[in-house]
């Protein structure tokens, strides 16, 4: 048997069927699970397939999905950010409290909260690379620190654990249009957060 024959035989052994390749895809489980949930509710919930119900489901999914996309990228890379959930609350507190206390445009508060979230992410990355501790431990510490800061800072500034309304402040209407408006398609209202979610998924997939 010559080298050419051996090579041909090896290549034939390594070949896998398209079905086996499909079953080996890591995202298959999520797709099958999503289809199973959709089919289940389509059969057992009469109003599930109505456009208004789908709009509600998509809106609920988008509020979680916007945060889940970057967390999923971290998990694909073998890391985990336990502080992501509480960071959502922290960013909202920073933007609203800064705008209210400084009598600033709401967009300024949004910008400040973005800087704070980037700083927290940079801190997590710095601690991870310098200490070589697991990302779970690093972000668990960040989670606990942010939880305490959220409660302590709001109590210190406002005297309560809640913030004042910023609905009547400058810049709020435009911020609401960008982040919380409703788009009517075919007579059904869809929250703009759904579009933000889909756009983020597209960018992350690319």
Image: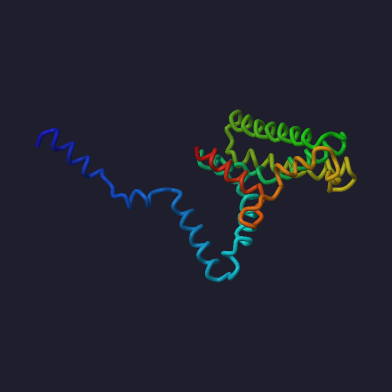
Residue 190 percent location from the top left of the image = 65, 53
Name the spot of residue 151 as percent of width and height, x first: 81, 45
Point out the residue furthest to the left here.
Answer: 1
Task: Report which quarter residue 97 is drawn in.
Answer: top right
Q: Which residue occupies 64% across, 57% down?
A: 188
Q: Residue sitting at 65 percent across and 31 percent down?
A: 122
Please tell me whether residue 126 is drawn above or below residue 45 in the rendered image. Answer: above
Front residue of 139/61: it is: 61
Residue at far front of view = 186
Percent from the top left, x then y, of residue 113?
A: 74, 36
Q: Residue at x 61, y 31 (%)?
A: 131
Q: Nearer the viewer, residue 36 or 203?
A: 203
Look at the image and name its color scheme: rainbow
| 71 to the left or right of 145 | left
Could you say which quadrant of the image residue 49 lies in? bottom right
What residue do we see at 62% from left, 50% from top? 62
Left/right of residue 163 with respect to residue 92 in the rendered view: right
**Res. 171 image quadrant:** top right
For the N terminus, which image quadrant?
Answer: top left
Count every numbered label the image shows and give the total. 0
Q: Residue furthest right?
A: 159
Expressed as whole percent of the image width and height from the top left, the position of residue 4 reads 14, 34
């Amino acid at each position: 048997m010559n080298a050419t024959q051996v090579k041909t035989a090896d290549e034939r052994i390594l070949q896998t069927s398209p079905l086996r390749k499909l079953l080996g895809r890591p995202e298959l489980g999520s797709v099958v699970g999503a289809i199973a949930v959709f089919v289940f509710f389509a059969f057992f919930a009469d109003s599930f397939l109505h456009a208004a119900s789908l709009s509600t489901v998509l809106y609920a999914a988008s509020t979680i999905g916007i945060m889940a996309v970057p967390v999923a990228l971290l998990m694909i890379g073998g890391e985990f950010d336990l502080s992501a959930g509480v960071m959502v609350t922290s960013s909202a507190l920073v933007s609203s409290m800064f705008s209210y206390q400084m009598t600033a445009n709401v967009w300024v508060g949004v910008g400040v909260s973005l800087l704070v979230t980037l700083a927290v992410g940079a801190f997590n990355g710095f601690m991870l690379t310098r200490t070589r501790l697991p990302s779970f431990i690093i972000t668990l510490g960040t989670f606990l620190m942010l939880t305490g800061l959220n409660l302590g800072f709001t109590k210190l500034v406002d005297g309560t654990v809640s913030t004042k309304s910023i609905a009547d402040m400058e810049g709020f209407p435009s911020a609401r249009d960008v982040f919380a408006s409703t788009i009517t398609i075919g007579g059904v209202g869809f929250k703009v957060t759904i579009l933000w979610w889909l756009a983020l998924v597209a960018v992350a997939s690319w």
